[in-house]
Image: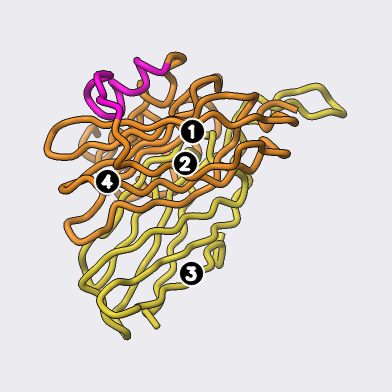
Chain colours: A orange, B yellow
Amino acid sequence: MNHNRRVLLKGSLAAGAVGAAVGAGLLTPKAVMAAWAKDAFEAKEVNAAMTGAMGSADATASDKIKLKAPDIAENGAVVPITVTSNIDGTTNMSILVANNNTPLTSTYELGPTTEAYISTRVKMGKTSDVIAVVKAGGKLYSAKKEVKVTIGGCGG
Amino acid sequence: MAKSIKLRAKAKGDVATVKALISHPMETGLRKDKKTGKPIPAEFIQEVVCESAGKTVLSAQWGSAISKNPFISFKFSGAKSGDSIKVSWVDNKGNSDSLEGKIK
């Protein structure tokens, strides 16, 4: 019986049984996807989020990281952020918003030929520092910029 | 969830620029329905993977703080026109989608 159950789980892992279980609240999504850094994304503090995402909260400020973000964001629900790193050997990047409920917005693992350039759009609850953290050669570097938000993008 | 992805990839010399737009509600789980006062359950993309010519060029983990209908752009080298490019995502409910295209 156990065996059958295992087979069933495997067969329908992608969408069926597990998806339904998630919907019913039986399983948290994080239990299904072990790869997703749950602790980091649920952390309420910048340091904890950074440790979870990048392995440490100890980052050196670097002007080789270019963080492009608006000075004033009229709509906090859509804040365009572009991060470019000119540090050789950049392997990972994360974007954090310090004053958000959960600061970590996203984390990226770059392939060997991928350039250290990411552009995306994030939500911001209120005026906050946006922090870009870059991992290169096992070390962490960061850059930050304050973005003023006139209308928050979280809650509503 | 078909056709949730719009994908553009363009090669300039050796470097390809990829732009992807995904239509997804990206609910944080913190918002409340104004009429009923009940919280809207969280629904957001957790993983985005991009592959080109069989190699993973970018794997991203997203939290709920990525905007609705997320946009992502990135560049990678060693690409040429005609190479395949594939973007796929998985959300916290287990929904997923992927799209394969070619670099122009």
Q: Are marks 1 and 2 in contact (CB under 8 Å)?
A: yes
Q: Which residue: 66% across, 36% down?
A: A72
What amino acid is labelled 3 in the image?
A: Leu
Q: Are marks 4 and 3 on the same chain?
A: no
Q: Which residue is mark 3?
A: B7
Residue A22: image tag: 1
Tag in front: 2 or 3? 3
Q: Are marks 2 and 3 in contact (CB under 8 Å)?
A: no
Q: Chain of mark 2?
A: A
Range of the magenta residues?
Answer: A46-61
- In the image, residue B22 lies at what x, y percent? 54, 57
Compared across the picture, whether A89 is left or right of B102 comes to left
Q: Which residue is mark 2?
A: A19
Q: Residue furthest front?
A: A63
Query: Who is closer to the viewer here, A34 or B56?
Result: B56
Query: Who is closer to the viewer here, A125 or A43?
Result: A125
Q: Chain of mark 3?
A: B
Q: Which residue: 21% across, 69% down?
A: B54
**Above-or-below relation of B104 to A144:** below
What amino acid is labelled 4 in the image?
A: Glu
What amino acid is labelled 1 in the image?
A: Val
Compared across the picture, whether A144 is left or right of A6 comes to right
